[in-house]
């Protein structure tokens, strides 16, 4: 019986020593950190009548701008309205819209971020994207639907659209295309 007590006492002491050793060799580290996230802020640069590059004879086209009513940083208009009158089959309108990226993070531009009342009467093609950064470096993307286009801080983006009337174009109809400055955060 004494032997059993002695072994039990030795085991209890051994477990206590293991616990004390573990406590002596264990440390705690607390890290306090602050993370500042960036923000997305893109807007249209209001042109002075230079948005319409070319129109077919008798066609009237112009661009107006609207401001988004959402929350957040707002430096300029978020919606460009392309208004077209007197379209007829085969008529073309070439539009150039300029977007300023004032975000603190890189963004990917979606040139097809628009709604319209065109139906099958008009077709739209974004045929060129170009950008100029704050250092004056430029790049042109001629296949914007196939090539992802990443824009960095303080970059000016230009999107060129070609709008063509099909045989379904109706007389005395005003066609409107509402282009949103749509971007998404660039993630690697």
Image (spheres, rainbow, N blue to C red):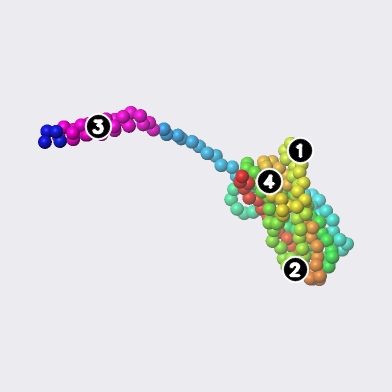
User: Which residue is located at x 73 percent, y 47 percent?
Assistant: 157
Q: Looking at this rendering, what residue extends furthest in the right direction? A: 57
Q: Distance between the residues labelled 1 and 4?
A: 16 Å
First along the sequence among labels 4 and 2: 2
In 3D space, how far apart are the residues under numbered discs 3 and 1 (Cα atoms)? 73 Å
Q: How many marks?
A: 4
Q: Which residue corresponds to the image point at 12% horizontal and 33% vertical from the top-left?
A: 2
User: CB under 8 Å between callouts 1 and 4?
Assistant: no
Task: Tell me the quarter of the image containing the N terminus.
Answer: top left
* Marking on residue 150: 4
How far apart are the alpha carbons under marks 2 and 3? 85 Å
Provide the residue designation for mark 1: 136
The verdict on residue 127 being magenta is no
Q: Name the residue under label 3.
A: 14
Q: Kindly check if marks 2 and 3 are in contact, taking CB atoms under 8 A apart as contact.
A: no
Residue depicted at x 14% and y 33%: 3
Residue 162, position as x, y percentages in the image: 79, 58
Q: How far apart are marks 3 and 4 (CA)?
A: 63 Å
Identify the secondary structure beneath mark 4: strand
Considering depth in this image, is 177 or 76 the residue closer to the camera?
Answer: 177
How crowded is the residue under tag 1: few (<14 C-alpha within 10 Å), some, or many (20+)?
few
Judged from this view, the residue extending furthest toward the left is: 1
Note whether residue 125 is visible. yes
First in sequence, mark 3 or 4: give its number: 3
Q: Which mark is residue 34?
A: none
Identify the residue position indicated by label 2 in the image: 120
Q: Where is residue 92 in the image (x, y as percent from the top left)?
A: 83, 61
Q: Mark 1 or mark 4, which has the lower sequence index?
A: 1
Magenta segment boundaries in residue numbering: 5-28
């Amino acid at each position: 019986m004494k032997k059993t007590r002695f072994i039990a006492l030795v085991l209890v002491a051994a477990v206590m020593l293991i616990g004390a050793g573990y406590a002596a060799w264990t440390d705690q580290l607390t890290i306090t950190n602050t993370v500042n996230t960036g923000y997305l802020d893109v807007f249209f640069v209001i042109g002075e009548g230079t948005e319409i590059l070319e129109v077919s004879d008798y066609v009237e086209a112009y661009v107006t701008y609207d401001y988004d009513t959402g929350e957040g940083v707002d430096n300029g208009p978020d919606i460009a309205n392309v208004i077209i009158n007197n379209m007829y089959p085969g008529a073309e309108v070439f539009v150039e819209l300029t977007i300023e990226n004032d975000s603190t993070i890189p963004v990917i531009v979606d040139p097809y971020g628009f709604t319209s009342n065109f139906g099958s009467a008009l077709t739209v093609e974004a045929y060129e994207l170009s950008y100029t950064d704050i250092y004056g470096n430029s790049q042109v993307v001629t296949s914007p639907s196939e090539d992802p286009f990443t824009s960095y801080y303080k970059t000016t983006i230009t999107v060129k659209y070609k709008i063509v009337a099909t045989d379904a174009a109706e007389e005395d109809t005003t066609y409107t295309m509402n282009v949103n400055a749509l971007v998404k955060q660039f993630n690697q």
